[in-house]
Amino acid sequence: MITQGHERERIGRRPKRVASRRPDLPVALASLIALVLVWAGGAWLLNDPRLAPGPQIVFPTLWEALISGQLWPDLSATLIRVLAAFTLAMGIGAALGVALGASERLDRWFGPWLTVALNIPALVTIVLCYLWIGLNEWAAIAAVAVNKIPMVAVMLREGMIARDPDLSDMARLYRMGRVARLRHILIPQLAPQIMAAARAGLALIWKIVLVVEFLGRSNGIGFRIHLDFQMFDIAGVLANALAFVAVMLVVEWAIVAPLARRAARWRQR
């Protein structure tokens, strides 16, 4: 029979095991290689290099674009837009979500606005930003950020609602300053939602950035894909997409995953 003490000990160990999980890079690389093999097998079965090019066609196309230097200016332009839109969306969305989660009255009034914003198609927002602001960088970055802000706000609002109010009461009882409460009480509790919003945001933002570039910019990976689309160059489309997917994988493994482990470190203690 499992005693209550043993059950508490088992439950107490569970968060530590989850929080200390680390990505296994060799396994991840092996998984990606298996995905490439599946892709190669599918291309071989279809046997149509023009409509379904395999990795033996796409990878040399990507390598040639990298070696010639043709891809680097477009890649850097897209990265700058992703970084700018991500920073704006996380900052504004986090502030809005914390405010709504902290005030039930604000949430009742402005929660429906957030629901409406979540369901506006990204294409509509992009077109409106281009029509209102013009075909420029400000419109491109604003269109991407506006599409991401509602999701960040919702995730942070739910984190605020689910936080432990006893910790805040204890902080006030011991007269902790606002900065100390923010650093030691609020941010650690919201860390899972912040990291989830950041991960989902990166995946969403770079996709919207490509649409923005496809529709109204003269550089970037999306613009390059637009040119390949006009030429019906499917291998070029896949090569440009793979270039940015590779960048995002490096960002995930080198930056986002270590930050997520650091944010969850307090659970191990």
Image (spheres, rainbow, N blue to C red):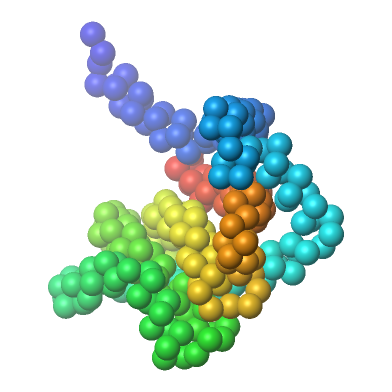
Q: Is residue 122 above or below residue 141?
A: above
**Is there any visible trace of residue 225 in the rendered image?**
no
Residues 250 and 169: in front is: 250
Q: For residue 169, which quarter of the picture?
A: bottom left
What residue appears at the point 58 percent right and 32 percent down from the top-left corner? Answer: 47
What residue appears at the point 74 percent right and 69 percent down from the top-left corner? Answer: 73
Quarter the N terminus occupies = top left
Q: Is residue 210 above or below residue 19?
A: below
Residues 15 and 36: in front is: 36
Q: For residue 4, which quarter of the picture?
A: top left
Q: Is residue 269 above or below residue 215?
A: above
Q: Position of residue 42 (x, y in %)?
A: 54, 31
What residue appears at the point 56 percent right and 86 percent down from the top-left corner? Answer: 136
**Is there any visible trace of residue 196 in the rendered image?**
yes
Q: Position of residue 175 (x, y in %)?
A: 37, 69
Q: Position of residue 217 (x, y in %)?
A: 58, 78
Q: With 47 as the anchor, is 158 left or right in this view? A: left
Q: With 62 as the anchor, is 145 left or right in this view? A: left
Q: With 118 as the anchor, is 29 left or right in this view? A: right
Total numbered badges shown on the rendered structure: 0
